Amino acid sequence: MAEIEDLDKYLADCTNIYPETLEEEFVRLSADLAYWSGQAEKALRAHLRQKLEVERARARAALSLRLMAEKTGAKLTESKVEDAVALDPEYMAAQNALVETECAKVKHQNILHAIGAKKEMMVSLGANIRQEKEHDPVIRERAATRRALREQR
């Protein structure tokens, strides 16, 4: 797929319904869903990798503190180690990055829900349009003509 220049505009196009172009909307729906599913997968992968990085940063900070305490002979409790790890700059940066990846993951999940809701609304809208057309005398006449032609064959 080509690079999308204005992602916000593309997202709006993916989630808006234009009743006058309902057929085209149905055609593009699967492509939109595929694109955003791929983006959600990337966001989830980044989030899971960042969770692993948080654990590694925590382990590195804890190990560093314990090694330093061992060299100096200082006594550390688990509580002190955990408190020191929580203030470690590398660990804090990893935690902040985790927050960002969690937000991206949730954003993409919500986009997928919005596209699913769009699909349901389009199906409902299509049914309403068909029902309205059934009451249109011109459309009813065309349908009756088609039926008559089929019966003659």
Image: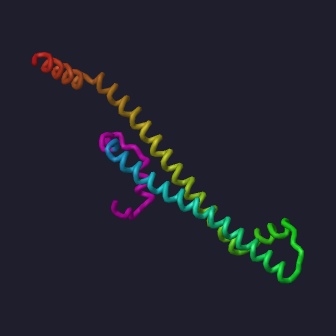
Q: Residue at x 59, y 58 (%)?
A: 103
Please name the predominant secondary structure of the magenta segment in the image: helix
99 left or right, relative to 37 = right
Q: Would you identify the image quadrant in which residue 79 lies? A: bottom right
Magenta stretch: includes residue 25: no
Can I make out residue 62 in this image?
Answer: yes
Q: Can you say which quadrant of the picture contains the N terminus?
A: bottom left
Q: Residue 134, how many percent across, how many down? A: 29, 23
Compared to 116, does 140 lie above or below? above
Q: Residue at x 40, y 56 (%)?
A: 10
The magenta span reads: 1-24
Looking at the picture, tell me which residue is in the foreground, 83 or 140: 83
Q: Residue 127, how many percent across, how many down? A: 37, 29
Looking at the picture, tell me which residue is in the foreground, 146 or 58: 58
Magenta stretch: includes residue 12: yes
Looking at the picture, tell me which residue is in the foreground, 109 or 67: 67
Number of disc labels = 0
Q: Would you identify the image quadrant in which residue 17 lies? A: top left
Can I make out residue 95 in this image?
Answer: no
Q: Residue 137, how many percent across, how many down? A: 24, 22
Q: Residue at x 32, y 28 (%)?
A: 130
* Residue at the extreme left of the image, as rendered: 153
Compared to 90, does 135 lie above or below? above
Compared to 126, does 93 lie above or below? below
Q: Residue 5, how many percent across, how many down? A: 39, 64
Q: Residue at x 10, y 19 (%)?
A: 153
